[in-house]
Amino acid sequence: MVKKIALATVATVAMVGVAQARDQIQIAGSSTVLPFASIVAEEFGNTFADFPTPVVGSGGSSGGLRQFCEGVGENTLDIANASRAIRGGEVEACGGAGVEQIHEIRIGYDGIVFASDADGAAFEFTPIDLYLALAEQVPVDGAMAENPYTNWSEIRSELPDQEIQLFIPGENHGTREVFEEKVLEVGCEEYEGFATVEALGEDAAEEACLAIRKDGRSVDIAGDYTETLARIEANPEGIGVFGLSFYENNRDVIQVATMSDVEPSLETIATGEYPVSRPLFFYVKGEHRGVIPGLDEYVQFFLSDQVTGADGILVERGLIPMPDAERTAVLDAYMNGETVSN
């Protein structure tokens, strides 16, 4: 109790004068959510004359949440964008720094796609293909061995005769976590040699499924999707991992691969037919509500029909919308003060 009172006191002191110090909402985080948040911030500034346009930065989901959890006050974030749900350890880190009121706002859905140069070969992937292309070690003759594959056609004859080169999200990105869970783990477990991996033991098997080769055929991208696109432009035989919304806005330069015979689209992701999809979020610091002007109005605007409804401006840019009832429930939860920690 003493600790909580002390933290609350520190938070209160930290927030004194914040409204005088700045009146502009500060946002950072997911590169997937970044283009959506940038559009909303601009529209928000144009719509509400009383509030300046929010400042939106990137840094990845983990980076944004790390900044968000640094504490309460004018030098800390008001909102963290994320392409994954906040982790328990991050909630604890927030609480340790006095951020105890964390509001989770789900904004819609997105798919993770695999894209290559628009003028290059077309790809039809399965999770097994990508596991075998990326794993540091793979089962060979009943034992784990260094990954021998250098060409896609070595993995499966139906794939193009093309050198393996992948550009995948760095570990600071929420996209990486979803990619590992829904592609690498699935591919590893579906592979006919999984018994060899499984024999390593539960923890070692999980580690082996997710360990990425370090021979240069896979490159971690710490920046946003524009960096991945630049890598493909420099190496037209490369395959990049993107959010569907980024692909939709760059169809003129990249083409998308199918996954398990399903082409990613707004429709196949909304129905769940496309297997590599995820919800998108942002997190609001409750201690800043009523202090930083416009926070509640920003959330209400973001979840409005005109922004994230079925015909909203973000749907036009590639966001897969939530059903109206789900969107209303998210806003009601926020306005009623529900947080991830209570």
Image (cartoon, rainbow, N blue to C red):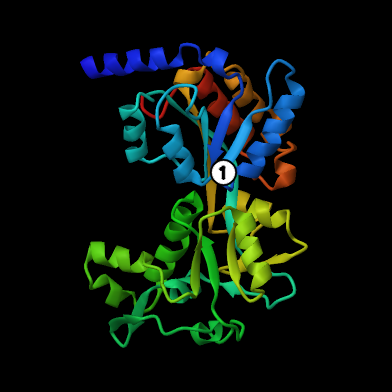
Residue 303 drawn above or below residue 183 = above
Say which quarter of the image contains residue 125: bottom right
User: Element type at marker 1?
Assistant: strand
Q: Nearer the viewer, residue 167 or 282?
A: 167
Do we see residue 102 in this rendering? yes
Task: Name the residue at 52% across, 71% down.
Answer: 126
Tell me: 253 left or right of 299.
Answer: right
Image point (38%, 74%), residue name: 136
Q: Where in the figure is residue 46, as x and y percent of width and height? A: 76, 25
* Residue in the image at 58% along x and 19% along y: 22
Q: Does the rendering let one see residue 263? A: no
Which image quadrant for residue 233? bottom right
Query: In front: 120, or 227?
Result: 227
Q: Is residue 192 shown above or below 320?
A: below
- Give the residue furthest to the front: 21
Give above or below for 236 relative to 160. Answer: above
x, y percentage for residue 175? 51, 53
Quarter of the rendering containing residue 248: bottom right
Q: Where is residue 3 in the image (x, y as percent from the top left)?
A: 24, 19
Q: Position of residue 4 (x, y in %)?
A: 27, 18
Q: In this view, does 249 lie above or below 309?
A: below
The residue labelled by disc 1 is: 58
x 42%, y 17%: residue:
14
Left or right of 3: which side holds 72? right
Residue type, numbered disc 1: Ser
